[in-house]
Image: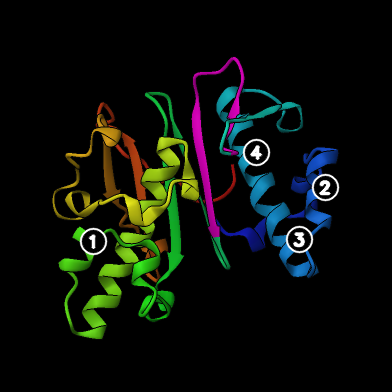
Amino acid sequence: MIVDPAQVGTEVTACLSAEEQKQAERFRFEKDAVHWRACRAALRTVLGKALEIPAGQLVFEFGEFGKPSLSGHDLHFNLSHCRNLALIALCRDGAVGVDVEPADRMKSLLGCEDAFCHPEELEGLPKSDGIRSILLMRYWTAKEALLKALGTGMSLPPQSVSIAGFIKRGFSDDPRFAGILAHCLDHRALDDHVAWLAVPDTVRCLEFHEGIV
């Protein structure tokens, strides 16, 4: 699901729990709180419709590394958002991870390679800043999606994991990623973004929807 957080109204964010409202209040700037509320409420709305449960009645549980889940349901999900867009991924086959970043952030990754690239990935980086920044953004978004599907997120040092195989072939020889495929997402709403999705290799069809319902 592709969501424009700016289109999520207060009638939708009313579904947030008291704890979520408190979490939003911790943001220093109100615009960031509004954005977070919109993305979280969109997630609740999408999950509620998929499960035919009122959005406000959903109860989240959190894993060892903070990844949320819904107890008693076989619907796996993940949320990623940047300044003007959010992606919500749903999957019944198993764990899922998604990440989206604005494409204009590519150049900011130059010089930060050692912070998130594995030595194998560093060896294959081109010299040209333009091409290098494109590949770095692919590594960043794909790696975050994969680690979110794995359940660790960035608590597993990203530079300790090579996903060069995913970038080149869509799958990896790393046993930690056994049974997981990575897809670079292509949709008109993502023209100014880079987004990757990690799903079980049993998933045969990817569907896109726009909106929050």
Asked whether the viewer can see residue 33, the reply is yes
Say whether residue 71 is magenta.
yes
Callout 1 touching callout 2 (CB < 8 Å): no
**Mark 3 — residue?**
33
Lower sequence index among marks 4 and 1: 4
On screen, residue 122 versus residue 199, left or right, reads left
Mark nearest the camera among 3 and 4 is 3
Lower sequence index among marks 3 and 4: 3
Q: CA distance from mark 4 to mark 2?
A: 16 Å
Mark nearest the camera among 1 and 3 is 1
**Mark 1 — residue?**
119
Q: Amino acid at mark 2?
A: Gln
Classed neighbour count for the residue bearing mark 2: other residues with Cα under 10 Å, few (<14), some (14–19), many (≥20)? some
Q: Tell me the element at label 4.
A: helix
Classed neighbour count for the residue bearing mark 4: other residues with Cα under 10 Å, few (<14), some (14–19), many (≥20)? many
Q: CA distance from mark 3 to mark 4?
A: 18 Å
Percent of width and height locating residue 149: 41, 38
**Mark 4 — residue?**
45
Q: CA distance from mark 1 to mark 3?
A: 37 Å
Location of the C terminus (image quadrant): top right
Callout 1 touching callout 3 (CB < 8 Å): no
Classed neighbour count for the residue bearing mark 1: other residues with Cα under 10 Å, few (<14), some (14–19), many (≥20)? some
**Mark 2 — residue?**
21
Q: Amino acid at mark 3?
A: Ala
What stretch of residues is rendered in magenta?
66-81
On screen, residue 87 above or below 27: above
